[in-house]
Image (cartoon, rainbow, N blue to C red):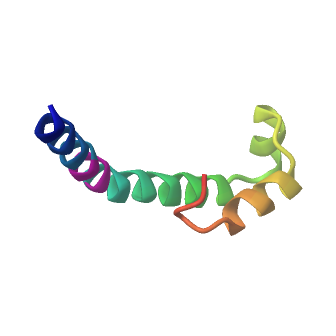
Amino acid sequence: MEGRVVRRLWRWLGETLLRLPRLWLERSRSRTALRRLDERMLKDIGVSKQSVEWEVRKPFWRD
Protein backbone atom coordinates (compact mmCIF):
# COMPACT_ATOMS: atom_id res chain seq x y z
CA MET A 1 0.00 0.00 0.00
CA GLU A 2 2.71 2.45 0.99
CA GLY A 3 4.69 1.82 -2.21
CA ARG A 4 1.61 2.59 -4.30
CA VAL A 5 1.16 5.93 -2.54
CA VAL A 6 4.80 6.83 -3.12
CA ARG A 7 4.54 5.91 -6.84
CA ARG A 8 1.40 8.02 -7.19
CA LEU A 9 3.12 10.93 -5.49
CA TRP A 10 6.14 10.68 -7.81
CA ARG A 11 3.87 10.41 -10.86
CA TRP A 12 1.90 13.50 -9.78
CA LEU A 13 5.11 15.41 -9.11
CA GLY A 14 6.53 14.48 -12.52
CA GLU A 15 3.35 15.46 -14.35
CA THR A 16 3.19 18.75 -12.48
CA LEU A 17 6.79 19.59 -13.30
CA LEU A 18 6.14 18.86 -16.97
CA ARG A 19 3.04 21.09 -17.02
CA LEU A 20 4.56 24.10 -15.29
CA PRO A 21 6.76 25.40 -18.13
CA ARG A 22 3.82 25.20 -20.55
CA LEU A 23 1.58 27.06 -18.09
CA TRP A 24 4.22 29.74 -17.51
CA LEU A 25 4.70 30.23 -21.24
CA GLU A 26 0.95 30.52 -21.74
CA ARG A 27 0.70 33.16 -18.99
CA SER A 28 3.58 35.12 -20.46
CA ARG A 29 2.07 35.08 -23.94
CA SER A 30 -1.37 36.05 -22.66
CA ARG A 31 0.03 39.00 -20.75
CA THR A 32 2.02 40.12 -23.76
CA ALA A 33 -1.10 39.98 -25.93
CA LEU A 34 -3.07 41.89 -23.31
CA ARG A 35 -0.37 44.56 -23.17
CA ARG A 36 -0.68 45.09 -26.93
CA LEU A 37 -4.40 45.90 -26.87
CA ASP A 38 -5.30 49.55 -27.43
CA GLU A 39 -7.83 51.58 -25.42
CA ARG A 40 -10.69 50.78 -27.81
CA MET A 41 -10.06 47.05 -27.64
CA LEU A 42 -9.81 47.13 -23.86
CA LYS A 43 -13.10 49.01 -23.66
CA ASP A 44 -14.71 46.38 -25.93
CA ILE A 45 -13.76 43.60 -23.55
CA GLY A 46 -14.52 45.64 -20.42
CA VAL A 47 -11.00 45.84 -19.04
CA SER A 48 -9.41 48.99 -17.68
CA LYS A 49 -5.89 50.13 -18.47
CA GLN A 50 -5.09 49.94 -14.74
CA SER A 51 -6.16 46.28 -14.62
CA VAL A 52 -3.94 45.54 -17.59
CA GLU A 53 -0.98 47.31 -15.99
CA TRP A 54 -1.41 45.29 -12.83
CA GLU A 55 -1.77 42.00 -14.71
CA VAL A 56 1.25 42.46 -16.98
CA ARG A 57 3.50 43.36 -14.05
CA LYS A 58 2.95 39.96 -12.46
CA PRO A 59 5.81 37.48 -12.79
CA PHE A 60 5.06 34.56 -15.12
CA TRP A 61 4.81 32.11 -12.25
CA ARG A 62 2.09 34.07 -10.46
CA ASP A 63 -1.55 33.43 -11.38
Q: Is residue 15 left or right of residue 50?
A: left
Whether the magenta-drawn stretch holds residue 18 is answered as no
Q: Residue furthest front?
A: 1
Residue sitting nearer the eye, 3 or 62? 3
Indicate the position of residue 60 as horizontal and vertical percent values: 53, 64
Residue sitting nearer the eye, 41 or 28? 28
Q: Residue at x 13, y 35 (%)?
A: 4
Q: Is residue 63 left or right of residue 53?
A: left
As drawn, 22 above or below 58: above
As drawn, 55 above or below 41: below
Q: Residue at x 83, y 34 (%)?
A: 46
Image quadrant in which you'd find residue 25: bottom left
Residue sitting nearer the eye, 21 or 14? 14
Q: Residue at x 59, y 59 (%)?
A: 62
Image quadrant in which you'd find residue 59: bottom right
Indicate the position of residue 48 as horizontal and vertical percent values: 87, 47
Q: Is residue 58 left or right of residue 10?
A: right
**Start-end of magenta stretch:** 13-17
Q: How many marks?
A: 0
> What secondary structure predominates along the stretch shown in magenta?
helix
Image quadrant in which the N terminus is located: top left
As drawn, 49 above or below 2: below
Q: Is residue 7 left or right of residue 21?
A: left
Indicate the position of residue 51 as horizontal and vertical percent values: 82, 52
